[in-house]
Image (cartoon, rainbow, N blue to C red):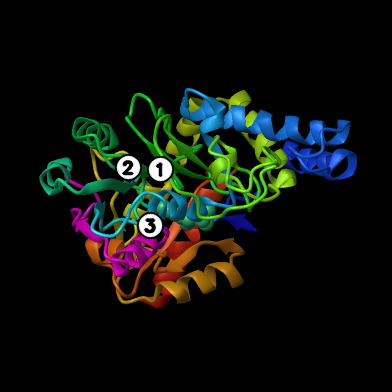
Amino acid sequence: MIYFDNAASSWPKPGGVTKAMENYLNDFSANPGRSGHKLARQAGNVVLGTRQRLAALINSPSSERIVFTLNATEALNTAILGSVETQDHVITTTMEHNSVLRPLNYAAKQGVEVEIITCNRNGLVDPDKIRSAIKQNTKLIAVGHASNVTGSIQPIEEIGEIARGADIPFLLDAAQTAGAVPIDVQKQNVSLLAITGHKSLLGPQGTGALYVADGLTVNPLKYGGTGSYSELEEQPFEFPDYLESGTLNGVGIAGLGAALSYIEERGLSEIINYKKNLVYQLINGLKGINNIQIYGHVNGVETVPVVSFSVSGCDSSEIAFILDSVYDMAVRPGLHCAPLAHKTIGTFPEGTIRVSLSVFNTKDEVAAFISAIKEIVKDMT
Ligand SMILES: Cc1ncc(COP(=O)(O)O)c(C=O)c1O
């Protein structure tokens, strides 16, 4: 199988991930942060190690401000629903994933005013439109770092500056960028960062995190046991425990730690360059095929390795089905959980064929994909 669905979940994982998860399960799968015995301490150290690695990856001033979640969706729900109340105003964009749009729509039903800024056809938001939308009751600016449909990276430095200047928390959805582009929450003025472990961070499913800037309060979505302050009947107001109720996914976090150490060893910039070359090869190959339209990848727009395209007159699901059944290649067709993004780039409701690359894909795989698409398009048009 040639796997090009890494924006959904990356596969394969670095070898160390399985090993770390196996070790955790077999050797010391006790409850991290509870009980205090040797095995619990060993599990706790693994959790702490991954927390510290994540903190280093995004330049968080401290690892306590990294809260583990199940995925980016849980992090985004906590950040959004824990930050806004009735009559607050939130600014977001049309390129957002449903994991941002749906909690915001829920909040809107509770009386929160949600303002959605329309992006251009390449999926980019104009920071000035965000600046102009700010009102006295604006309590959050929520933006996706990179689109999971077009791959385009938003001008987050400018948005972060605007948010900082107006003293409004800036929530960045880094589901497609953590492990794919450098992130520096301090330099980029990010107050809340939603991360997922199972995409470009190369970790297992069931892992993610929310970074919360020092001094910022976000109400928990869940209340319960934290292993700390057991004498208290109320949720302890200490990070990360405040937002981390219930036993963590220790085995997943062990795997994520190993994935992060793979990224550290190989080097993020080497990984970025490797994938950039594959994207370049893919785009050039697709451009040479008649009737193909590529979305978002234009000069001057930075992207993650996500390429969406359509073939005029052809159904994307049919092409994906042929790729899977005849060529043993995995892509994602249709709408990618971001309906407004498709409306923005003009691919609603038919959607696109999305090819998303990982550091384990190769030039030969990309070349094979281009040949396959050439044959399919020839047969279908
Ligand atoms: C931009 C974006 N945000 C959020 C999510 C949700 O991520 P998760 O599946 O880890 O909850 C995704 C997943 O595809 C995404 O692409």
Direction from residue 14 to residue 135 in the image, left or right: left
Does label 2 point to a residue whose CB lies under 8 Å from ligand 1? no
The quadrant of the picture occupied by the C terminus is: bottom left
Q: State if disc 1 and disc 2 touch (CB < 8 Å).
A: yes
CA separation in Å, label 2 and label 1: 7 Å
Q: Amino acid at mark 3?
A: Val
Q: Position of residue 243 (x, y in %)?
A: 54, 45
| Secondary element at image label 2 | loop
Residue nearest the observer in this picture, 135 or 305: 135
Which numbered circle lies on residue 304?
A: 1
What label does residue 344 carry, if any? none
Q: Where is mark 3, residue-wise?
A: 100
- Callout 2–callout 3 Cβ contact below 8 Å: no
Q: Mark 3 or mark 2, which is nearer the start of the sequence?
A: 3
Disc 1, SS = loop
Question: Label 2, on which residue?
Answer: 153
Q: Tell me the amino acid under the disc marked 1.
A: Val
Q: Is residue 182 above or below residue 312?
A: above
Q: Is residue 262 visible?
A: no
Among the two numbered marks 2 and 1 on one chain, the one whose residue lies closer to the N terminus: 2
Per the model, the C-alpha gap separating discs 2 and 3 is 16 Å
In the rendered structure, does residue 225 fall within the stretch colored magenta?
A: no
